[in-house]
Amino acid sequence: MEIKKQAVAGTVESSDIMITIEPNDSQGIKIDLESSVEKQFGRQIRQVIQETAEKLGLENATIIAVDQGALDCTIQARTIAAAYRAADETQFNWKEISSWTV
């Protein structure tokens, strides 16, 4: 999946996460995380974002996450929504995505 523009999904409300995805010039995925629970769950949050990005086939993207204690399923959903928006994708394969586990 090619990232064409900056896109956002989610909010900074309690128990949510705001994911911003934008293209970058370097190879790979870069994750910047700001979280109220980073010391306890930062590694897990990054892992969910990274695994979701890999499953979507993202390349050369910067992912900025502002977390307020979101559950893994919310992190995954926000990452998927932001990625599809950033890639200008309009077709969504619900069956494939629903088979993923967090």
Image (spheres, grey):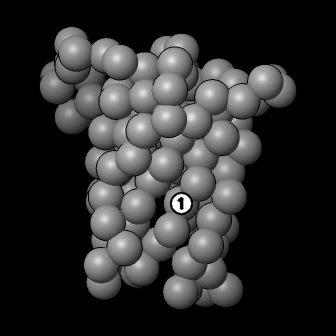
Q: Residue furthest left?
A: 94
Residue at horizontal 72 percent and vertical 30 percent from the top: 24
Q: Residues within 10 Å of mark 1 (few under 14, many from 20)?
A: many
Whole-percent x, y for residue 86 in the image: 43, 28
Q: Residue at horizontal 31%, vertical 16%? A: 89
Q: Residue furthest front?
A: 5
Which of the two residues, 74 or 44, is positioned nearer the viewer here? 74
**Residue at (61%, 73%) from the top-left corner?**
34
Residue found farthest to the right: 26
Q: Is residue 79 left or right of residue 65?
A: left
- Residue 102 visible: no
Q: Is residue 25 left or right of residue 83?
A: right
| Count of numbered badges drawn on the protein | 1
Secondary structure found at label 1: strand
* Closest to the observer, 61 or 76: 61
Whether residue 102 sits left or right of residue 20 in the image: it is left
Q: Pinpoint residue 57: horizontal percent, then vertical percent.
A: 53, 20
Quadrant position of residue 25: top right
Residue 84 sits above or below residue 32 on the image: above
Q: Is residue 10 visible?
A: yes
Q: Which residue is mark 1?
A: 65
Residue 2 sits in which quadrant?
A: top right
Identified by mark 1, the residue type is: Ala
Q: Position of residue 48 (x, y in %)?
A: 51, 53
Is 80 situated above or below 24? below
Residue 12 image position (x, y, % from top left): 37, 73
At 52% from the left edge and 40% from the top edge, which residue is drawn? 21
Is 50 drawn above or below residue 57 in the view shown?
below
